[in-house]
Image: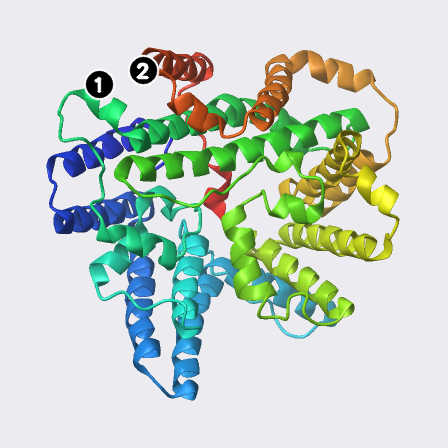
Amino acid sequence: MLFNTIDFLIFFVAVVTTIVIVKNKKFQHLFLVFSSYFFFYFSSNYLITLLFFSTILDFYIGKKIWETKNIKKKKLFLIGSLAGNLGLLGFFKYSDFAILQFNFMGEFFEIGESLPFLNLVLPIGISFYTFQTISYTVDIYRGKLSPSDSLKEFALYVSFFPQLVAGPIVRAKDFLPQLREKLDSFSENRNLKQIILKNSNLKLGITLMALGFFKKMFFADNISPLVNSVFSNPIGSESLTIILATIGFGIQIYADFSGYSDIAIGAALVLGFKLPLNFNKPYFAISPSDFWNRWHISLSTWLRDYLYIPLGGSRKSDSRTYVNLIMVMFLGGLWHGANWNFVIWGLLHGLYLVIHRLLKNKIQDTKLLKFFQTTYGKIIGIITMQYFVFLAWIPFRVQDFDSMLYSMQKYIFFDFQYTNTIEFISTQKLPLFLMGLFFILNFISYRKKNLPNIISKLKLRYWIVFLVIIMSSILFFYEGNPENFIYFQF
């Protein structure tokens, strides 16, 4: 069930209405579990059994890890959890990719016949809820979390519909304690105006949802035709055309994914839950590490806590730190999809992180370091960082290897040809206008800290005007065919 459809709006209003009317906490929990399962079943049908499996597996294994005193048995239970979760993820997401590599090697060395592909359907959200359940059992093993006593509550943690499909990736230690309180914070007053005025979470949640829909349906969906027209067959395109399409995709994927996150966080707030921030103005990052502190934060912190630090982090030698960074970003790239272009994207970011750390270790000039803390230094840092971030978006978007190499070459080595680009620009006026508007609004958002909070605190009449402008802008350009969110494929 896509967020950007009438089906979801009807579903969400029905869920919120029921939560408002029925104040019993146990009923609210149970109702949200069944609502979440319905939400998942609506899109995935029988694949909901995988969600059941992960939930039941880790609920009981978590208890066993907690109750067992023998460290070897604890490890065996943890290995069972990891094997079950990663086994499912690997089978459904990477089987055909592994078969493809096996067949390639077999053909290269002329050893045997090719294996047939399984052509499995990728269950939506499996990469996200798998990471959530893994963090649950690992945190119990580390002694940082006690297991949930209620299967119902744990099931709600795993399946909570706002963030089930594409995150943010939520930690049990942050989510489960919220279930001890009433799910809703709606006023007992049934007057709609009073409910809105007295409930800051409700107003902020609706504001975030509106901004999320605006990012997705106004920016991402209307810029995608420009991106598709170039990257469907980029060979022969001029450098400026490739650069425009690359910038377009960078805006598209940010507006698409951060838009989803805003809707998820906003919907959760309306229901009384707080989910973690997933984006924090990433295109104003001044370094690779700063970028990953701002982009897909719930994934980057998960990779840090459950991969990078256990591998040794930066506690050992510099060379070991560099290997750890490359390894984590390689796996982060592979997490996005069973394709070498995602691996290349991850390795590029791993290389950026290594080079940045090398430079930090080598540069001892205090004047130079102070310069990068000035306004001009930060501007140079932002422009330089985004140049490389957008370069890495090319392998993320272009799956054909020859097309990817051609696009990257044209991006790096400018050809100073404009004839075809001028004609191209004349056919893409709306996407180009929206790209320019995005940068203006993004800069305003950067200058105005916590813009959603500022908007949500407007007087009611001005806040309603804001919502009307947002919805009118979306509907004016909406063509009636809702587009999938990009991260649904992961």
Q: Is residue 238 visible?
A: no
Frontmost residue, 181 versus 338: 181
Mark with earlier residue (1, 2):
1
**Side of 483 where 403 appears, left or right:** right
Identify the image quadrant of the N terminus: top left
- Could you tell me if the residues under marks 1 and 2 are in contact, i.e. CB atoms within 8 Å? yes
Dot 2 alpha-carbon crowd within 10 angstroms: few under 14, some 14 to 19, many 20 or more: some
**Side of 68 where 27 appears, left or right:** left
In the rendering, which numbered label is found on residue 360?
A: none
Residue at position x 56%, y 34% from top? 254
Q: Is residue 472 visible?
A: yes
Residue 141 location (% of width, % of height): 41, 74
Residue at position x 15%, y 20% from top? 191
Residue 285 location (% of width, % of height): 67, 39
Residue picked out by circle 1: 193
The image shows residue 434, relative to residue 446, as above or below, that is: above
**Side of 215 where 383 appears, left or right:** right
Residue type pointed to by label 2: Leu
Residue picked out by circle 2: 460
Frontmost residue, 297 versus 395: 297
Residue 77 quadrant? bottom left
Q: Distance of mark 1 from mark 2, alpha carbons?
A: 8 Å
Frontmost residue, 235 versus 147: 147
Residue type pointed to by label 1: Lys
Dot 1 alpha-carbon crowd within 10 angstroms: few under 14, some 14 to 19, many 20 or more: few
Residue 88 quadrant? bottom left
Frontmost residue, 74 versus 182: 182
- For the residue labelled by badge 2, is the local secondary structure a helix, a strand or a loop? helix
Residue 404 location (% of width, % of height): 73, 42
The image shows residue 384, relative to residue 288, as above or below, that is: above
Residue at position x 25%, y 26% from top? 198
